[in-house]
Image (cartoon, helix red, strand yellow):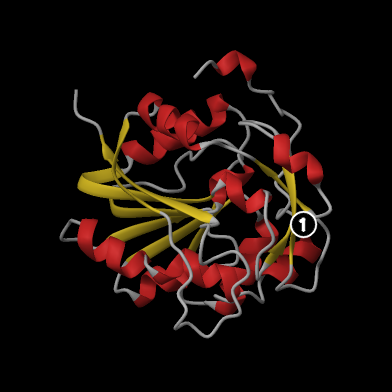
Amino acid sequence: MNDDRVPAADDFANVYNDARRAASYDQLEFPGSYHLAFRDLPHLIATHGQGARRRALDFGCGAGRSTRFLAGLGYQTLGADISAAMLDLARERDPRGDYHQVADGDLGDAVPGPFDLILSAFTFDNIPTWERKVALLTGLRTRLAAGGRLLNLVSAPEIYRHEWLSFSTKDFPENLTARTGDRVRIVMLDVEDRRPVDDVLWEHGDYLEVFRQAGLRPVAEHRPLGRSDEPFAWVTETTVSPWAIYVLEAATA
């Protein structure tokens, strides 16, 4: 794709670097639509995960929900995030956890590898521009152990165009015409803070190009759907997936 057509969005700010929103988000575990984001991760990790160390990085760990999730799968997990407010909550919930703050757009020395597994859950929804996405994914690639895997869990463009058990977008018709790099808005229904969240939409083909530029190769892609035997009153989730999960490896020359 042509990078020149994508708005720069250099003034885009991570909405979770906010104490009120962080406190609200901290109450989330795996309700509703979020259940689908995490339900199939253990199988994907068991299928594609490699490495004897079982050392993992949770990049964009927020309040530590996904860090605790990986630890529950037996990984020695380091959580990293740019938000001090989120990390404070993570440490309160998980005093024995290993949490580190990184600068916006720069992994620095806070997350030395190698890692057998890197999980980035929703993080790239809030990272604008090709340059930042490529730079951060390149940095994550260099921290993969030999045979390691990076799981990039992102919001599919469809999440911003439908109604869901856990989200609403009906008040933002501009989402319907958004393309890669455009800001989109969504309301989270499972938290007390109902202020709209600003994300950056990124289409599938453009994610593939970002991965290529970062020296990563997809080995699997998964779009989880809701099932009728699950205890949720699904809205759109049984026919359209709100999430895309990319399993990536370092590309060889």
For residue 217, what is the image quadrant? top left
For residue 163, what is the image quadrant? bottom right
In the rendered image, the vertical position of residue 81 relative to residue 252, given as above or below: below
Q: Dot 1: what SS?
A: loop
Horizontal and vertical percent position of residue 241: 51, 57
Horizontal and vertical percent position of residue 29: 57, 76
Closest to the observer, 168 or 192 = 168
Residue appearing at x 53%, y 57% in the figure: 240
Q: Residues within 10 Å of mark 1 (few under 14, many from 20)?
A: few
Left or right of residue 107: residue 43: left
Horizontal and vertical percent position of residue 62: 59, 61
Task: For the C terminus, give its image quadrant.
Answer: top left
Residue appearing at x 22%, y 56% in the figure: 48
Closest to the observer, 117 or 160 = 160
Question: What residue is shown with label 1?
Answer: 18
Left or right of residue 112: residue 235: right
Q: Which amino acid type is shown beneath numbered disc 1? A: Asp
Residue appearing at x 66%, y 69% in the figure: 166
Q: Residue furthest left?
A: 52
Left or right of residue 200: residue 52: left
Q: Is residue 102 visible?
A: no
Q: Is residue 161 visible?
A: yes
Left or right of residue 58: residue 187: right
Horizontal and vertical percent position of residue 250: 26, 36
The mark tally for this picture is 1
